[in-house]
Amino acid sequence: MTRVTDGPVEGVAAEFAGEAALGAVLTAEPPDRADRTEVPAGTGRRLLRFFVRRPGLVLSIVIVLVVVIAAFWPGLFTGQDPLATSPGQTFRGPSGAHWFGTDEVGRDVFSRVVHGAQLSLKATLIAVVLAFVVGGVLGLVAGFVGRWVEDVLMRVVDVLLSIPALFLSLALVTALGYGTTKVAIAVGIASVAGFARVMRSEVLRVRQAVFVEAARGAGVRWYGILWRHVLPNAIGPVLVLATLDFGTAILAVSSLSFLGYGAPPPAPEWGTLISEGRNYLANAWWLTTLPGVTIAATVLATNRIARALDGEWAKQR
Amino acid sequence: MGRYVLRRLAQAIGVLWAAYTIVFVVLNLLPGDPVSAMAGAGADSGTIDPAVIARIKHQYGFDRPLLVQYGEYLGRAVRGDLGTSISTGRPVTSVLGQALPQTLELTGAALLLAVVFGGGVALLATYTSWRWLRQLLLSLPALGVSVPTFWVGLMLVEVFSFKARIFPAFGNDGLRGLVLPAVTLAIPTGAVIAQVLAKSLLSALSEPYVETARAKGAGRVRIHLRHALRNASLPALTVIGVWTAQLVANSVVVETVFARNGLGRVTQSAVTVQDLPLVQGVVIFGSLVFVGANLLVDLAYPLLDPRIVVASARQVRFA
């Protein structure tokens, strides 16, 4: 990340018009002038100061870590079985024994949310990686090869952008069928276009650089130039976009599973949880409210981290 | 100006055709078998008569080569015929046409709310000199793009329908029934408009012409609204163009939350029963909205900023 952040990272925000990165520049704490004139402190001290000045960022990192840990080791947070019903304990409000209350058949909602993190995170990860790899390769090829290949690929990308993401995902779900993985693939493909655009513009920028010309002059083959010189320098903004897309993908995946195309019940996917709790909105607010807060907090946290990667951290250096 | 309009129009038609093609490829080339789903509807799967499948395939033309199907469908689509819905047996255009008014009402109201409140937040945030208010207003959009739409809808229902009993929770009845769905749908779009407009307002306010206007003695409000806003509104207009189609798509989720009739209900059931012609019609309609909204925005640019036509004309000449 060290070198790549020197580039026009703002480009990501511009390309991704409408996503949280734009807010990044606005709500960012104003750059501290005092920092720059001071004698440069050690990297550790600077890192510490960077985080101390941004409690929201620290909280975001903690939230994301908790969600990731919950996805891999749900047992650390709850000993209760997410599927175990207990007829005597239906519709209990949040309490010490059941942090998020219990649902219509007495299942512990907190444990369902914790175990659901695995499903939702898996789907999100598949979606983001798919979009990153496919979009990245498309953009790389378009930017590096140029000529008619670039024209054709970028036209396809433009057309993909002209189909509203949710509709494209729904068309893919219609063709592929239901289930967490299929929903994830649908969401991933629907966001390929953004990655392709950013990757291409970065490759175009790096391709002009003097060191690429020097490498070519020194007789490096094209794949060497691509792999050793262009890719490492172009991938930074695409990685930032991937962190941003993480939040978008969580929302898209949970929307689709809310609509009923995700894992079939009783799987505790986050969107499905809210969709189930919806029937008891009038008498059990916690069934929809608390899983929703979990989703919102996770998305907020990933967006905040993406914002930090996009602008603030680069500025600090 | 005439040339500019023609060029934009030709581009729009090209994009629509390509979008149609992509949707056709997605729905027809990917694995997934709508016919057996259709034949098996109601019956237990596994005991479907092959003859029934063959008959349905023939009826909808699924047994012919894909390229032939594509050519024929495209030819019909150009003439405004999007095929026949499998699940209802009615023409896709008539199914869409019947569902459309409710959805347009909803998305129109949402777009209005998004522009008014998103723009209001941006204007107030850049105008106020109270630091805390500015920070508060500028942190709202980040929140707005992070909350799941369907969840916001359910929360609003819980508070305003079940606790306070001000608005109805479900259904299509009248203006009162429109408030909660429209607010829900407007939040993400409004948040994005606020982000983009606030950013471009801030950069416009630091331009030299603002300094000049100030030196000439123009008031703060006048500078803000007449000088900065007009120049800053172009990026926001672009966002509105892009997000209008997203609004139509997101109405699928919102209509499901509020159990409203409309395009969303149609879409959800079409996806559930794998009604390919209907799904295709919905997606093409979404693409049409996208292309149409962007066309309108493109045509509105020159009214706000005459330099755009000049630049575009120059581009054509030298290209």
Image (tube, coloured by chain):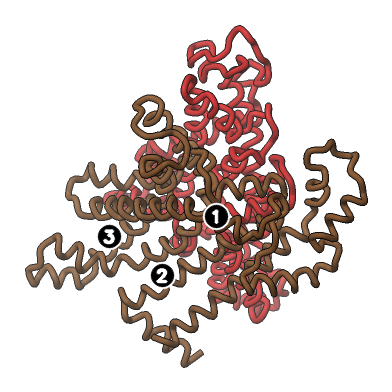
What residue is shown with label 2? B297
Identify which residue, B34 or A303, lies in the foreground: B34
Question: Can residue A317 be seen here?
Answer: no
Mark sitting earlier along the chain (1/3): 1
Mark sitting earlier along the chain (2/3): 3
Identify which residue, A89 or B51, lies in the foreground: B51
The residue mark sitting in front, 1 or 3, is 1
Question: Can residue B55 be seen here?
Answer: yes
* Image location (x, y in percent) of residue A132: 63, 55
Q: Residue B73, relative to residue A186: is it above or below?
A: below
What residue is shown with label 3? B202
Mark 2 residue crowding within 10 angstroms, few (<14) / some (14–19) / many (20+): some
**In the displayed image of the protein, which residue is found farthest to the right?**
B50
What residue is shown with label 1? B98
Q: For the point 34% across and 27% down, which residue is it?
A: B164
- Disc 1 to disc 3, how far (Cα)? 44 Å
In the picture, one chain is brown; tell me its letter: B
* Image location (x, y in percent) of residue A35: 31, 49
Which chain's residue wears label 3? B
Q: Label 2's element?
A: helix
Seen in the image, is B239 located left or right of residue A271? left
Tell me, yes or no, whether dots 2 and 3 are on the same chain.
yes
Quadrant of residue B308 in the image?
bottom left
* Image location (x, y in percent) of residue B176: 36, 40
- Disc 2 to disc 3, how far (Cα)? 22 Å
Image quarter of the N terminus of chain B: bottom left
